[in-house]
Amino acid sequence: MTQLDVRPQVADTVIGAAEGDVRGKGLGKGSVGLVGSAVIGISTVAPVYCLTSTLGSTAGEVGLQMPAVFLAGFLPMLLVAFAYRELNKAVPDCGTSFTWTVKAFGPRVGWMCGWGLVIATIIVLSNLAGVATSYFWLLAGEITNNPSISALDDNKLVHIATCLTLIAAATAISYRGMTATKGVQYALVGLQLAVLGLFVAMAFQKASAGSFDTGLDFSWQWMNPFAVESMAAFTAGLSLSIFMYWGWDACLATNEETTGSAKTPGRASLIAMVVLVGSYLATGVAAQMAVGSGAGGLGLGNPETSDNVFAALAGPVMGPLLGILLFVAVLASATASLQTTFIPVARTVLAMSTYEALPSSYAKVHPRFKTPGRATVMAGVATGVFYTVMTLVSENVLTDTIFALGLMICFYYSLTAFACAWYFRGELRRSARDLFFKGVFPVLGGLLLATVFLKTLIDMWNPSYGSGSTVLGVGSVFVIGVGLLALGLVIMFVTERRSPAFFRGQVLTKSTPALVVED
């Protein structure tokens, strides 16, 4: 037998060894292509919503270096995206981070990684629903020119009722499958990117015309992260920047429903990342040139408008009529993300249930829509209950829960990055490509995010972090963040008593791919 005859047979053996315990789940295969997958990733991130809620806060922390911090936040996400791509090629499973970390580090670490993803997504869903609700009433007031309609958002019962209605609608669309999801997403993502492009063009025009006294001339120094005044300011800005990229991994959660499941999701995630960083840099530079980053007037760092920059800039930059489009874009962004963010959490729960890490009832797939119906409904119910309870208990608690989100994001992203290097550890010497894309890049990304995780954990201890609330003298953000992780441990131990086979490593094995022997 010749050398050419041997290699395909060895490669088949490797794939079987790596994926032999991975289970099919009955999802609708081939329902998403490259463009659809990339659109889902962009939609989940919600670029217009992220920009209006964090553009001002980031400028307030790092000043003119805001574009540099956007690039700095992009770096660890790009490095982690390489890890996701390589793991997806070897094990295209909708459980993504959960499945991969189980296979790399064992069932308990993998279970906690899955928990980090699930709880982070529930927090984000509740926040997105709240933002979409607020913008719904704000837009209604703008269109009717009636402040009393906008004020309905301040009525807690009206706000909660509207929020639950939006959550129910998003759940229903996700329940009906990827085909319904794609149709809605193409429209909403196209709308928000088109309006964002119009805003950027008009901001550049206002800057060149010197329309605002606080406007600035462009400087390449804005791209220098080392010009940030302090490490504390840089870390705070970086945390905000990392949050702005969160959600691109939804591309990978649809891998079992994507054409070319081993390669297409990884390519889609990289496309989504490029679109996002381009959008953020263009908007950041244009806005900074137009109005500056100061704390007065229309400056991006003005604390009175920093939590909703586009609401302040819509009229001055785009005029009263076109400015309404910016409100529509923010509402579209939050609504689109609310709907697609159900994708990763439902499929992670489906995978955990399929591999006996959660009750088997969540492993059911709808026979017609080919979606994890029960897991999707569970995510919707959990989101509605979580938001309602947090809103009724305290606005401060809800705010601090959102601040604790960064901890969860860094937790499961960094674990997944480290899992990539460990899973492929036997292959790192095969080629320079394997060394960097399966080892060096993922480890660097994991270390960067782990550093942010630890720094955030330390900062959270301070009562001034977040809303300023305390529990026995400790910052409530710390209590919530650590408490949610501790809750995951408790649920894991309870689950272990009911489903010992998974935790004994008998269902999803802790195996690494065999080496392909080079002749």
Image (spheres, rainbow, N blue to C red):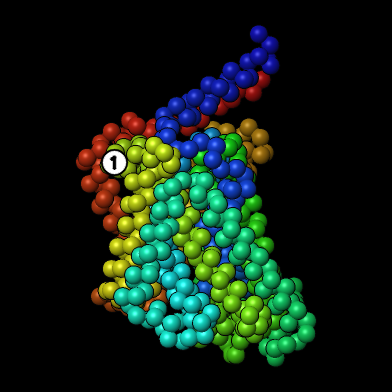
Locate residue 155, reporting x and y percent: 34, 80
Task: Please identify the residue farthest to the right as the structure is shown.
Answer: 208
Where's the N terminus, which quadrant? top right
Task: Please identify the residue farthest to the front as the structure is shown.
Answer: 144
When the figure is inspected, residue 429 is found, relative to residue 200, above or below; the finding is above
Left or right: 37 with respect to 480? Answer: right
> Is there any visible trace of residue 43 in the rendered image?
yes
Locate residue 37, reporting x and y percent: 57, 47
Residue drawn at x 50%, y 51% as measured from the top left: 181
When the figure is inspected, residue 343 is found, relative to residue 303, above or below; the finding is above
Using the image as rendered, state which of residue 148 and residue 47 is in the foreground.
148
When the figure is inspected, residue 19 is found, relative to residue 396, above or below; the finding is above
> Is there any visible trace of residue 87 in the rendered image?
no
Residue drawn at x 63%, y 19% as measured from the top left: 7
Locate residue 488, reporting x and y percent: 30, 53
Locate residue 50, reporting x and y percent: 54, 68
Where's the C terminus, which quadrant? top right
Left or right: 405 with respect to 483? Answer: right
Residue drawn at x 51%, y 76% as measured from the top left: 139
Badge 1 is on which residue? Answer: 361
